[in-house]
Amino acid sequence: MIPYATATSMPPILRIRALRCEYPGEAGPVHALRDVDLSVARSSFLAIMGPSGSGKTTLLHCAAGLQNPTSGSVELDGQDLRGLDQVQLARLRRRRIGFVFQSFNLLPALSAIDNVELPLRLDSRKIEPARTTELLTRVGLGNRGSHRPHQLSGGQKQRVAVARALIAGPDIVFADEPTGALDIRSAREVLRLMRELADHGQTIIMVTHDPVAASYSDAVLFLADGRIVDHLPRPTAQQVAGRMAVLVESAEQAVHGTAVHR
């Protein structure tokens, strides 16, 4: 098992064991994940990186209950996702998991307030306007609640998406390239927000290709060919970029059938 963050005596919020995910391919099965073991501490901010095709998005989707693995187990706060049917998985995602997408996924006809409250409405839960206002204020949009997505900047849209991910009080927030569609300034605002959330107790797992984004995390896991191959605690952007350069070079040499000498 790869260590990932600061030590804690509390049970991990997420535990993954022997996770495998395969897809059919023309030349045989494609192994997206190969026996991945991972434990994630509560209140930690974990970044996942790797070359294209390394399995990072597949790992994120399996961990979030969006995709069924071929084998292995995913436990969220002690609950094994293998025993849940699709209805139960959907309920779990609405109540215990937040998800932030690269493309925001806001409904254009709804205001920021209505977009944030949407998960509660879908789950037939009571709406507490004060809670919505508090969240929008927390992400710096207290005066933008009535605005629709087309009236917001990219960074503001993503902060609405973060508030929506938090509205149900999730155990864990998954973020899939949350700054990939943002300019540098907006990306920095969103990353600072996510760092602040983790510092106040929210668990965050983020897939990113950006070494600067990864440097906001507590630790970075590096994937290659469906396996966790490296781990970097307290990362700097320069360290992350260096590790990624080695992995990308190795992946390119493997594609061309040449050995890696390092």
Image (cartoon, grey):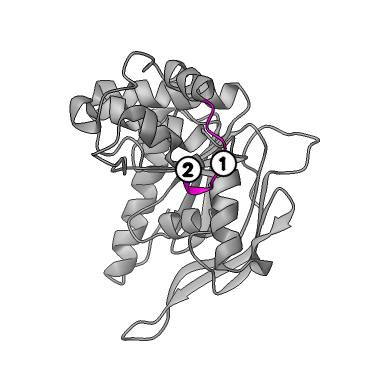
Res 258 label: none
Image: 200 above or below 240? above
Image location of residue 85, percent across then percent down: 60, 69
Image location of residue 144, percent across then percent down: 31, 18
Q: Amino acid at mark 2?
A: Arg
Q: With 96 as the anchor, is 240 left or right in this view? A: left
The answer to whether any part of residue 182 appears in the image is yes
Residue indicated by mark 2: 121
Image: 226 above or below 160? below
Residue indicated by mark 1: 125
- Residue occupying image coordinates x 31% and y 40%: 106
Q: Amino acid at mark 1?
A: Arg
Mark 2 residue crowding within 10 angstroms, few (<14) / some (14–19) / many (20+) = few
Q: With 109 as the anchor, is 16 left or right in this view? A: right
Residue at the bottom extreme of this rendering: 27
Q: Is residue 125 magenta?
A: yes
Image location of residue 159, percent across then percent down: 37, 27
Answer with the quarter of the image where residue 87 lies: bottom right
Q: Which region of the structure is painted magenta? A: 121-128
